[in-house]
Amino acid sequence: MHRQFDRSFDSLSALYEFAEKALMAHDIGEAVRFPIHLAMEELFTNMVKYHPDGDLEIGVDLDVEDGLVTVTLTESGVDEFDVTRPREIDTTASLEARRPGGLGLFLIQHIVDTLEYDYRDKRSTVVFTKRSGN
Amino acid sequence: MFEIAYGSDGEIICRGRLDAAQCEKAQSFMDLVEGPKTLDFMYLEYISSAGLGILLKTQKRLTESGAALRIINVNNHIYDVFRYSGFHAIFDISARE
Protein backbone atom coordinates (compact mmCIF):
# COMPACT_ATOMS: atom_id res chain seq x y z
CA MET A 1 0.00 0.00 0.00
CA HIS A 2 1.24 3.46 -0.85
CA ARG A 3 0.11 6.89 0.23
CA GLN A 4 1.46 10.42 0.21
CA PHE A 5 1.21 12.53 3.39
CA ASP A 6 1.62 16.25 3.87
CA ARG A 7 4.84 17.14 5.67
CA SER A 8 3.11 18.08 8.93
CA PHE A 9 2.52 16.75 12.42
CA ASP A 10 -1.15 17.00 11.52
CA SER A 11 -0.62 14.02 9.21
CA LEU A 12 0.14 11.66 12.10
CA SER A 13 -3.47 10.65 12.63
CA ALA A 14 -3.88 9.73 8.96
CA LEU A 15 -0.50 7.96 9.00
CA TYR A 16 -1.65 5.85 11.96
CA GLU A 17 -4.95 4.97 10.28
CA PHE A 18 -3.18 4.06 7.04
CA ALA A 19 -0.79 1.69 8.81
CA GLU A 20 -3.42 0.24 11.13
CA LYS A 21 -5.69 -0.63 8.21
CA ALA A 22 -2.86 -2.32 6.29
CA LEU A 23 -1.57 -4.25 9.30
CA MET A 24 -5.00 -5.37 10.48
CA ALA A 25 -5.75 -6.65 6.97
CA HIS A 26 -2.86 -9.07 7.47
CA ASP A 27 -3.84 -9.98 11.05
CA ILE A 28 -0.65 -8.46 12.44
CA GLY A 29 -0.85 -8.57 16.24
CA GLU A 30 -0.62 -5.59 18.58
CA ALA A 31 2.84 -6.62 19.78
CA VAL A 32 4.14 -5.93 16.27
CA ARG A 33 1.79 -3.10 15.33
CA PHE A 34 2.92 -0.98 18.29
CA PRO A 35 6.63 -0.84 17.35
CA ILE A 36 5.74 -0.33 13.68
CA HIS A 37 3.54 2.66 14.53
CA LEU A 38 6.26 4.01 16.81
CA ALA A 39 9.03 3.63 14.22
CA MET A 40 6.85 5.21 11.52
CA GLU A 41 6.02 8.20 13.72
CA GLU A 42 9.61 8.75 14.80
CA LEU A 43 10.91 8.64 11.22
CA PHE A 44 8.06 10.77 9.85
CA THR A 45 8.34 13.45 12.55
CA ASN A 46 12.09 13.49 12.04
CA MET A 47 11.48 14.39 8.40
CA VAL A 48 8.94 17.06 9.38
CA LYS A 49 11.20 18.62 12.02
CA TYR A 50 14.53 18.61 10.23
CA HIS A 51 13.52 19.13 6.61
CA PRO A 52 10.80 21.81 6.71
CA ASP A 53 11.90 23.10 3.30
CA GLY A 54 11.65 19.72 1.59
CA ASP A 55 8.96 18.86 -0.94
CA LEU A 56 5.49 19.11 0.59
CA GLU A 57 4.64 15.42 0.56
CA ILE A 58 6.33 12.40 2.16
CA GLY A 59 5.67 9.02 0.58
CA VAL A 60 4.97 5.96 2.72
CA ASP A 61 4.78 2.36 1.54
CA LEU A 62 3.76 -0.53 3.76
CA ASP A 63 3.94 -4.09 2.53
CA VAL A 64 3.47 -7.43 4.26
CA GLU A 65 4.83 -10.60 2.72
CA ASP A 66 5.33 -13.96 4.42
CA GLY A 67 4.99 -12.32 7.82
CA LEU A 68 7.60 -9.66 7.11
CA VAL A 69 6.40 -6.05 7.38
CA THR A 70 8.40 -3.60 5.26
CA VAL A 71 7.88 0.14 5.61
CA THR A 72 9.48 2.69 3.28
CA LEU A 73 9.43 6.46 3.80
CA THR A 74 10.61 8.71 0.98
CA GLU A 75 11.16 12.45 0.85
CA SER A 76 12.64 14.70 -1.83
CA GLY A 77 14.28 18.11 -1.94
CA VAL A 78 16.18 17.48 1.30
CA ASP A 79 19.72 17.34 2.64
CA GLU A 80 21.26 14.06 3.79
CA PHE A 81 20.26 12.82 7.25
CA ASP A 82 21.35 9.26 7.98
CA VAL A 83 18.80 7.98 10.51
CA THR A 84 20.82 4.81 11.06
CA ARG A 85 23.36 6.90 12.97
CA PRO A 86 21.49 8.37 15.95
CA ARG A 87 23.35 10.35 18.54
CA GLU A 88 24.40 8.40 21.58
CA ILE A 89 21.99 8.44 24.51
CA ASP A 90 23.22 7.47 27.97
CA THR A 91 20.16 5.64 29.26
CA THR A 92 21.85 5.15 32.63
CA ALA A 93 22.35 8.89 33.20
CA SER A 94 20.76 10.52 36.22
CA LEU A 95 17.62 12.60 35.86
CA GLU A 96 19.69 15.76 36.27
CA ALA A 97 21.99 14.74 33.42
CA ARG A 98 19.24 13.67 31.01
CA ARG A 99 18.29 16.10 28.25
CA PRO A 100 15.14 15.91 26.10
CA GLY A 101 15.66 15.07 22.45
CA GLY A 102 17.34 12.41 20.36
CA LEU A 103 15.36 9.55 21.84
CA GLY A 104 13.26 8.84 18.77
CA LEU A 105 15.98 7.56 16.48
CA PHE A 106 17.62 5.83 19.41
CA LEU A 107 14.41 3.93 20.17
CA ILE A 108 14.03 2.75 16.59
CA GLN A 109 17.26 0.77 16.89
CA HIS A 110 15.58 -1.32 19.60
CA ILE A 111 12.21 -1.94 18.03
CA VAL A 112 12.79 -2.79 14.36
CA ASP A 113 14.62 -5.74 12.85
CA THR A 114 16.44 -3.86 10.09
CA LEU A 115 16.87 -0.17 9.24
CA GLU A 116 18.44 1.14 6.04
CA TYR A 117 19.03 4.62 4.65
CA ASP A 118 19.75 5.72 1.09
CA TYR A 119 20.44 9.23 -0.20
CA ARG A 120 20.83 10.34 -3.78
CA ASP A 121 19.77 13.32 -5.91
CA LYS A 122 18.38 15.20 -2.89
CA ARG A 123 16.12 12.23 -2.13
CA SER A 124 16.13 10.29 1.15
CA THR A 125 14.73 6.78 1.43
CA VAL A 126 14.37 5.01 4.75
CA VAL A 127 13.38 1.34 4.88
CA PHE A 128 12.73 -0.68 8.01
CA THR A 129 11.43 -4.20 8.52
CA LYS A 130 9.73 -6.00 11.36
CA ARG A 131 9.01 -9.73 11.44
CA SER A 132 5.47 -10.46 12.60
CA GLY A 133 5.72 -14.17 13.20
CA ASN A 134 2.40 -14.68 11.37
CA MET B 1 -7.23 11.15 20.02
CA PHE B 2 -5.55 12.12 23.26
CA GLU B 3 -7.11 13.41 26.47
CA ILE B 4 -5.54 14.48 29.73
CA ALA B 5 -7.48 15.51 32.84
CA TYR B 6 -7.56 15.23 36.61
CA GLY B 7 -9.41 12.27 38.10
CA SER B 8 -11.56 12.32 41.22
CA ASP B 9 -8.61 11.51 43.50
CA GLY B 10 -6.29 14.14 42.04
CA GLU B 11 -4.51 11.71 39.76
CA ILE B 12 -3.81 12.72 36.17
CA ILE B 13 -5.58 10.45 33.72
CA CYS B 14 -4.15 10.11 30.21
CA ARG B 15 -6.25 8.56 27.50
CA GLY B 16 -5.59 7.61 23.88
CA ARG B 17 -2.42 8.15 21.88
CA LEU B 18 0.25 10.62 22.93
CA ASP B 19 2.07 11.33 19.68
CA ALA B 20 3.95 14.38 18.43
CA ALA B 21 0.72 16.01 17.22
CA GLN B 22 -0.71 15.94 20.76
CA CYS B 23 2.31 17.28 22.61
CA GLU B 24 1.15 20.87 22.81
CA LYS B 25 -2.00 19.79 24.65
CA ALA B 26 -0.04 17.53 27.01
CA GLN B 27 2.72 20.07 27.62
CA SER B 28 0.23 22.86 28.39
CA PHE B 29 -1.42 20.66 31.00
CA MET B 30 1.80 19.38 32.57
CA ASP B 31 3.32 22.86 32.79
CA LEU B 32 0.65 23.70 35.39
CA VAL B 33 1.26 20.61 37.53
CA GLU B 34 2.77 21.27 40.95
CA GLY B 35 3.87 18.90 43.71
CA PRO B 36 3.93 15.11 43.63
CA LYS B 37 1.43 13.64 41.19
CA THR B 38 0.32 10.26 39.93
CA LEU B 39 -0.13 9.75 36.19
CA ASP B 40 -2.62 7.00 35.43
CA PHE B 41 -1.86 5.35 32.07
CA MET B 42 -4.68 2.78 32.29
CA TYR B 43 -6.27 4.24 29.16
CA LEU B 44 -3.09 5.39 27.41
CA GLU B 45 -2.50 3.13 24.41
CA TYR B 46 0.63 4.65 22.93
CA ILE B 47 3.45 7.10 23.55
CA SER B 48 6.32 8.22 21.34
CA SER B 49 9.56 10.04 22.09
CA ALA B 50 7.68 13.36 21.91
CA GLY B 51 5.61 12.30 24.91
CA LEU B 52 8.67 11.00 26.72
CA GLY B 53 10.20 14.44 26.34
CA ILE B 54 7.24 16.02 28.14
CA LEU B 55 7.49 13.53 30.99
CA LEU B 56 11.23 14.14 31.32
CA LYS B 57 10.86 17.92 31.29
CA THR B 58 8.10 17.77 33.94
CA GLN B 59 10.02 15.34 36.14
CA LYS B 60 13.11 17.56 36.06
CA ARG B 61 11.04 20.63 37.01
CA LEU B 62 9.20 18.88 39.85
CA THR B 63 12.29 17.30 41.39
CA GLU B 64 13.83 20.73 41.76
CA SER B 65 11.15 21.36 44.41
CA GLY B 66 11.45 17.89 45.94
CA ALA B 67 8.42 16.41 44.20
CA ALA B 68 8.11 13.76 41.48
CA LEU B 69 5.78 12.04 39.06
CA ARG B 70 4.61 8.49 39.68
CA ILE B 71 3.26 6.58 36.69
CA ILE B 72 0.83 3.69 37.16
CA ASN B 73 -1.06 1.17 35.01
CA VAL B 74 1.49 1.24 32.20
CA ASN B 75 0.80 -1.23 29.39
CA ASN B 76 3.49 -3.67 28.25
CA HIS B 77 4.37 -1.82 25.06
CA ILE B 78 4.77 1.54 26.77
CA TYR B 79 6.73 -0.12 29.55
CA ASP B 80 9.15 -1.46 26.93
CA VAL B 81 9.60 2.08 25.58
CA PHE B 82 10.36 3.30 29.12
CA ARG B 83 12.84 0.48 29.59
CA TYR B 84 14.68 1.08 26.31
CA SER B 85 14.86 4.78 27.18
CA GLY B 86 16.14 4.18 30.70
CA PHE B 87 13.08 5.98 32.07
CA HIS B 88 12.31 3.09 34.41
CA ALA B 89 15.30 4.30 36.46
CA ILE B 90 14.21 7.93 36.75
CA PHE B 91 10.47 7.44 37.25
CA ASP B 92 8.49 5.39 39.75
CA ILE B 93 6.62 3.20 37.26
CA SER B 94 4.22 0.34 37.81
CA ALA B 95 2.87 -1.89 35.07
CA ARG B 96 -0.77 -2.52 34.30
CA GLU B 97 -2.01 -5.69 36.03
Image (spheres, rainbow, N blue to C red):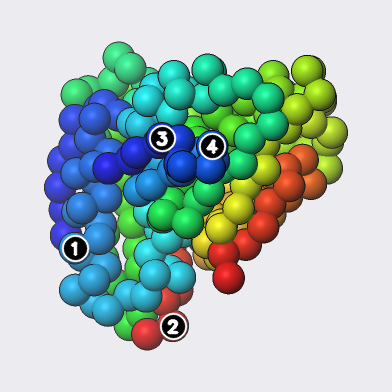
Mark 1–mark 4 distance (CA, rounded to whole Å): 37 Å
**In this rendering, position of residue B93 left or right of residue B27:** right
Q: Amino acid at mark 2?
A: Gly
Find residue B10 and name its label. 4
Disc 1 target residue: A21
The answer to which image quadrant residue A65 occupies is: bottom left
Q: Amino acid at mark 3?
A: Ala
Find residue B5 and name its label. 3
Quick one: label 2, few (<14), some, or many (20+) residues within 10 Å?
A: few
Mark 4–mark 2 distance (CA, rounded to whole Å): 42 Å
Name the chain under label 3. B
Q: Nearer the viewer, mark 1 or mark 3?
A: 3
Q: Residue B53 location in percent, x, y? A: 57, 30
Name the chain under label 2. A
Quick one: label 3, few (<14), some, or many (20+) residues within 10 Å?
A: some
Q: Nearer the viewer, residue A131 or B16?
A: B16
Name the chain under label 4. B
